[in-house]
Amino acid sequence: MTNILIVDDEQEIGRFLTRLFQAKKINVTYAESGQAFDALTQLDRFDAAFLDVRLPDRNGLELLKKLKKEAPFCKTVVMTGYSTVKMAIEAIQLGAEDFLEKPFEDIMAIEALVDQLTTNDQLDAYREEAQRSGVFLGTSSAVHELYRLAFKLADKNITILIEGETGTGKEVLARFLHQAGNRSKGPFIGLNCGAISESLLESELFGHAKGSFTGAAENRAGFFEVATDGTLFLDEIAEASHATQVKLLRVLETGEYFKIGDPAPRQTGARIIAASHASLEKAVSEGTFRSDLLYRLDVVKLVIPPLRERQQDITHFIDLYSRKNGMSLPFSPDAMNVLKTYHWPGNIRELVNTLQRLFVLYADEPVITPHMLPEKMNRTAAPLKKASPQTRTFESDWRLFSSYILDSYTNDEAIHLDELVQTMKRMEKRTAEAFIHKTLKETAGNREQAAQKLGISKRKIRYYLNET
């Protein structure tokens, strides 16, 4: 029989959950305080636990730590009021599976959560959702922890702030939160607050009534109205003007907004996800961002690590992106070293742009070498012996090709044989060209003599030199 522990000082909640779980044929143990929890023995007998994070005599996080130490396989849910959501997030980072906000509004959701905790292993659920959403997780533990937490937050009707440098994938994370949650069937509306003027931003967000300003020929729904059953993603929120910030604050506090030109207040149920590449705390200290708006946005903050802190993922990302887009980009060891030591100020976006550039310029090359990379990358990379386009020779290309093949053979990472064969075919053509040019030089350009020495026809020479 499944055993569940409930720790909550509110006896009404304790009785309610006890009856709910017992109706599902679950054995329930109830403790009304930290002291009662301490008196329990054999904590490892519990399959799941529901802990209040605020008890009169104890911080619920202390109980969580003890439970995780003595019963590591016990799946834990923390219960919290809105004012302690941050503490609930900390609990999840300490190993809790989920959190419930009090007062409880959806009994069926609690029952579904219990079923999930007691019957299914949800350890890799975030990976499956990331794969469905096209998210690249890589091997970085920080990124995996980030998306594991995001997956647990996806169903929560709370505001989330995403911070990360330009190009790290803030919108990708926002879309993951939307797709993984119970609003996935609703619209996902994204708006860059720094990309449009203040007057247009206000109209886009709140909508306008017919005749409210010159050019307003008809009523127009704003994004708060359109996204009421979905998610509104406000990118670069730090760029919003003070006037817009005031209006956003009202929406976050009350759910109310006003259409331009319409005095009647309206309600929105949109879930807000905001993002910024700049530190909002710093913006507050500089007086460019309201502290009360930051307080409302920063219920939960997710920080995306920059690419330079997950350089081990560069090889994996290149491989995945190349296969997904039908590219073949075999990098020499030196070129890959340049990519791994470059600081990537534009992060994943810059890496994607670099790969697209290389494919357009060097798709027919057998191996991508350091000199083919943007000059700025070679300036910041570790010193390399690099060949310029003028000094490239068949000998240097062959050495790079051989090194690439041997490196692929001796490396423990998975290879893609089709790409390897394509690389070999390009080098085969490069080899033929090199021997033809060498023989033509020896015969003073006489193609008939060169063909005889090489044992091929003159037509074959034209073929290898792309003259047919």
Image (cartoon, rainbow, N blue to C red):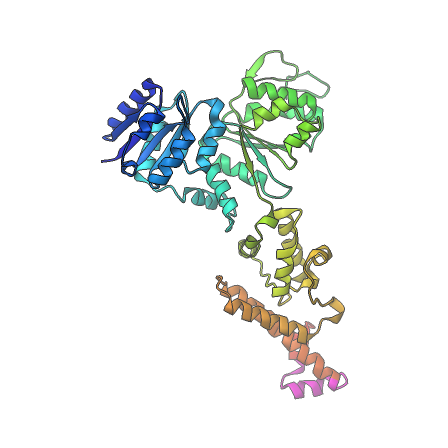
**Is 57 contained in the magenta span?**
no
Left or right: where 94 falls relative to 214: left
Q: Residue at x 63, y 44 (%)?
A: 167
Image quarter for residue 275? Answer: top right
103 or 223, which is in the foreground? 103
Task: Using residue 120 as the reference point, say whether residue 340 is left or right of it.
Answer: right
**In the depicted structure, whether residue 81 falls above or below residue 189:** above
Quadrant for residue 32, please give it.
Answer: top left
On the image, the x and y values in percent for residue 133 come to: 49, 43
Q: Nearer the viewer, residue 47 or 396?
A: 47
Quadrant for the C terminus in the image: bottom right
Query: Which quadrant would the N terminus be assigned to in this image?
Result: top left
Residue 458, magenta (yes or no): yes
Is residue 6 shown to the viewer in this render? yes
At a point 41% along the width and 42% down the height, the residue shown is 125
Q: Is residue 223 visible?
A: no
Which residue is located at x 70 percent, y 59 percent? 378
Counting from the top left corner in percent of width and height, residue 152 is at 44, 35
Q: Main secondary structure of the magenta part?
A: helix
In front of the other: 467 or 256: 256
Residue 27 drawn above or below residue 419: above
Q: Position of residue 356 (x, y in %)?
A: 64, 54
Task: Report the span colored magenta.
Answer: 442-459
Residue 451 placement, left or right of 35: right
Q: Quadrant of residue 273?
A: top right
